[in-house]
Amino acid sequence: MPGNYTINRKVAPLLSGDTRHWEPVDNATTFLWVRFIGHAFWPEHYWIHHRKTAFLDLEIIDRGTMTIRSATGKFTVPEKGAAIIPPGEFTLAADDGEIEKRHIGLTGILCMDNLHEFALDRIVILPDFSDMQFNTIFESLYEMADKQCHGSMHDYAALAYKLLLILSGNARTLHLPRALAEAKSFIEWNFSRKLSLEEICAHAKCSKTTLQWQFGHYLRTTPVKYLTGVRMKFAQRALTDHELSIKVIADQCGYDNPFYFSNVFKEHFGCSPRAYRKMRQS
């Protein structure tokens, strides 16, 4: 991003890190992509001012505290917390001491055009971001970005989608009851396999009655309908990738039978997956 940021040059020589940059190379990868990922050490009083960004920035603070300043206000990201920052102008600073952090830059049509839908169109501070699923994804993405193997690009993009769902889920569930937040996250993470209501309740550690009431009260739906909705949203987006067959998309959504998948899709959107794909092509 030459020319798009300024930094505190006095302490810049004390910076260290191992960020990997991997730019999108074709239409499939520009759909959703992790543009950069890595670790960094910032000394006290270091700051960087981004005048204009074209990516969704995720900052995970492993040690220390970070300050964010933007047109919408001033935010503090605590140790073990994270910040989700939409594209735009902002300043990141290590005002009160050294920082050890991880960072990820998400880009692509799916991300940039749907920030509001993902509830990621404003700065979100997550006070506690000790998520083992995220840590596993982070390490896998970092390893792929380090090797930059052409054969792993689709797996890289698929992991980026799971990462986007985790961020969206965290942003949406900040003020939800624990059991509902757990169930919602579990569904979003596991929608690609067969799930039963019993399994969802077991993960959320609550009864069917409680979970169904919470889904109805807070989200105006049921657990099963929410699962179907997550699958259909994924299918809708996946259909824009013309290299994926209907059968593959059905399987990725947790449906063994592509015909049943097509019927569910038609009930949800009023047209078949093939018809939807043709409409998007025209």
Image (spheres, rainbow, N blue to C red):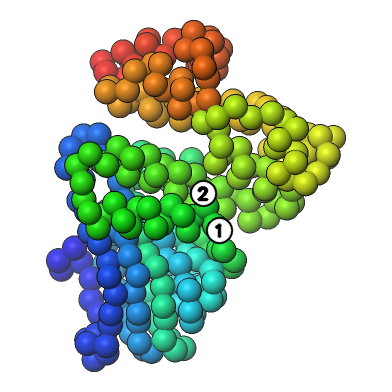
Check disc 2 and give the amino acid type. Ile
C-alpha gap between disc 1 and disc 2: 9 Å
Residue at (44, 89) in percent of width and height: 97
Query: Which SS class for mark 1?
Result: loop
Residue 252 percent coordinates (x, y): 45, 27
Residue at (45, 43) in percent of width and height: 162
Q: Tell me, yes or no, if residue 126 can be seen here.
A: no
Nearer to me, 213 or 14: 14
Disc 2 target residue: 166
Q: Tell me, yes or no, if residue 187 can be seen here.
A: yes
Residue 10 percent coordinates (x, y): 24, 91
26 sits left or right of 270 in the view: left
Disc 1 target residue: 131
* Relative vertical location of residue 105 with respect to residue 233 in this rendering, above or below: below
Nearer to me, 202 or 226: 202
Answer few, some or many: residues within 10 Å of disc 2's Cα (few below 14, many 20 plus, some between 14 and 19). Answer: some
